[in-house]
Image: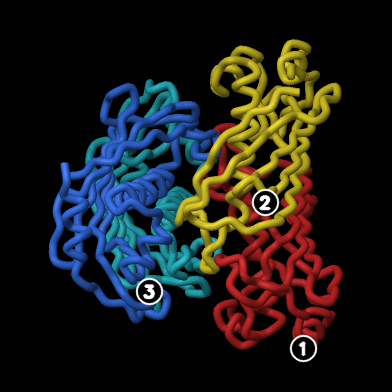
Chain colours: A yellow, B red, C cyan, D blue
Amino acid sequence: MLVNTRSVRIEWGDCDPCGIIFYPRYFAFFDASTSALIERALGMIKRDYLKAYDFAGHPLVNAHCRFLIPTRFGDDVTIETTVTQIRRSSFEVRHRLTKDAALAVEGFETRVWVQGHPASGRMKAVPVPRDVIERLSRG
Amino acid sequence: MLVNTRSVRIEWGDCDPCGIIFYPRYFAFFDASTSALIERALGMIKRDYLKAYDFAGHPLVNAHCRFLIPTRFGDDVTIETTVTQIRRSSFEVRHRLTKDAALAVEGFETRVWVQGHPASGRMKAVPVPRDVIERLSRG
Amino acid sequence: MLVNTRSVRIEWGDCDPCGIIFYPRYFAFFDASTSALIERALGMIKRDYLKAYDFAGHPLVNAHCRFLIPTRFGDDVTIETTVTQIRRSSFEVRHRLTKDAALAVEGFETRVWVQGHPASGRMKAVPVPRDVIERLSRG
Amino acid sequence: MLVNTRSVRIEWGDCDPCGIIFYPRYFAFFDASTSALIERALGMIKRDYLKAYDFAGHPLVNAHCRFLIPTRFGDDVTIETTVTQIRRSSFEVRHRLTKDAALAVEGFETRVWVQGHPASGRMKAVPVPRDVIERLSRG
């Protein structure tokens, strides 16, 4: 499967009064990492791939994180993202965030490929395009 | 077990270009909900209970969310929070976020009671005080 | 002028490693406060007033804050919001955030009433509807 | 004066239902930009320079932003940061955020060099160290 790797600096404003990251920030990092993976697979940025494939996005139905080592402001971490499974209209994403080469956080998402208008509740799962599956599956 | 219920307005700034909530915001809501539950159990705000029980906080080792119904700006939602299990030095929290009485999001956290300095990596799990267990366990 | 007052709890996740609020959070509070003021003036929530008045929103061209007293998690603060001036297609908003009755933060915004599609860059300032001006001007 | 330049990708999660950035995010970007400038001037990351100069940080007393051109997810923007004035215990910072070489946002901060404990309200302005002034003033 295609893997996308990116570096993120943990900032002062990402951290809580204990001096470690406020964990919801990890989910924001991971959301951007999923978009970055798909952008890389499809060769275009998200606002272009939403148009090119004429869909409304890939909202989550499940998110799960394991926190192993705390990170704090000034840490430069690496996030490796890959799709681990693709079903008809949903797919699984895994993020591995490392700090000094040690696994610090592991994130898992189940996302659905949808059309329609999420805000109005009128959205429906549609098949992930074959083209997208192929591009995400490349080594 | 003690249950704490609070209302949250989903704001414009919580929402993404689809007009629905950017899901990391749920984790921020749930973190505040866990603090609110403990504050209610102990009868003091977090900065006071950190001092009173002389500990560094209750960081997460696991967070899990299921997203069932999207929410959008202007929605007033209700979050019901309770501890579902208490072990020696960790505990499980469950959040049920409802919109118009329908379950929209369900969140689960595993938290550890720690002493020390999380930012320096020198923190250790310590037993949840008996007093805290009793107060969280009340109906 | 109409004044809207609301209470906000400063949360753990709003605060930085110094234990005081990470100041960008004030701007998020103030954005929600401006919407709350207009919602109160017009008697409907934002997603309804955007439709009823057929416009794209009230983006900022200027934001300014003075920080007088730090706030920290557990603080319950009060935000008083009012429009201080209305021009043809723009208006000035002032927020006064108090803690224990002392002014802690003062925020000022210049907002424009726009139609079109902000994301595509095709938006234009249009006159604030007379009805809206009247309702915001009531004592 | 020393200028620090960094690139930021505007992410999906930074944007609001209009598809443009939710403006409080700019202040988070600018806070990180100020730290990056000082880190570059002093040759160490923030958590190290807080220790090396034995101070509590550089909180804001004033923040001001002018928003000229909206940015949206997928935009890669550049932030140029410099100190424009240094007084005894405070200094002025200016951020210029450009998109395709056009000025999109301009930010101004007044920050104070403080010692003590901001969260307890016991902090006091102290002189900016001469060494820091010199390093920030280099071309």
Mark 3 and mark 2 residues within 8 Å of each other at the beta carbon: no
Residue B45 x, y percent position in the rendering: 58, 79
**Where does the image place residue B6, in percent across and percent down from the top left?**
67, 66
**Please, is residue D27 above or below residue C106 in the view?**
above
Residues at marks 3 and 2, common chain?
no
**On screen, residue C95 above or below A110:** below
Is residue B47 shown above or below B26? below
- Along the line of sight, the residue nearer the viewer: D89 or A119: D89
Task: Say what amino acid the circle numbered 3 marks.
Answer: Pro
Q: In 3D space, how far apart are the residues under numbered discs 2 and 1 (Cα atoms)?
A: 32 Å
Identity, as a three-letter code, of the amino acid under mark 1 = Asp
- Mark 3, secondary structure of its residue: helix
Amino acid type for the residue under numbered disc 2: Ala
The chain letter under disc 1 is: B
Q: Is residue A96 above or below residue B132?
A: above
Instruction: Name the foreground residue: D3 vs C32.
Output: D3
Nearer mark to the viewer, of 2 and 1: 2
Using the numbered discs, state the Cα–Cα distance from disc 3 to disc 2 in whole angstroms: 30 Å
Name the chain letter of the residue that bears numbered label 2.
A
Q: In whole angstroms, how far apart are the C-alphas of marks 1 and 3?
A: 31 Å
The residue wearing badge 3 is D118
Q: Is residue C56 visible?
A: yes
- Residue A104: numbered disc: 2
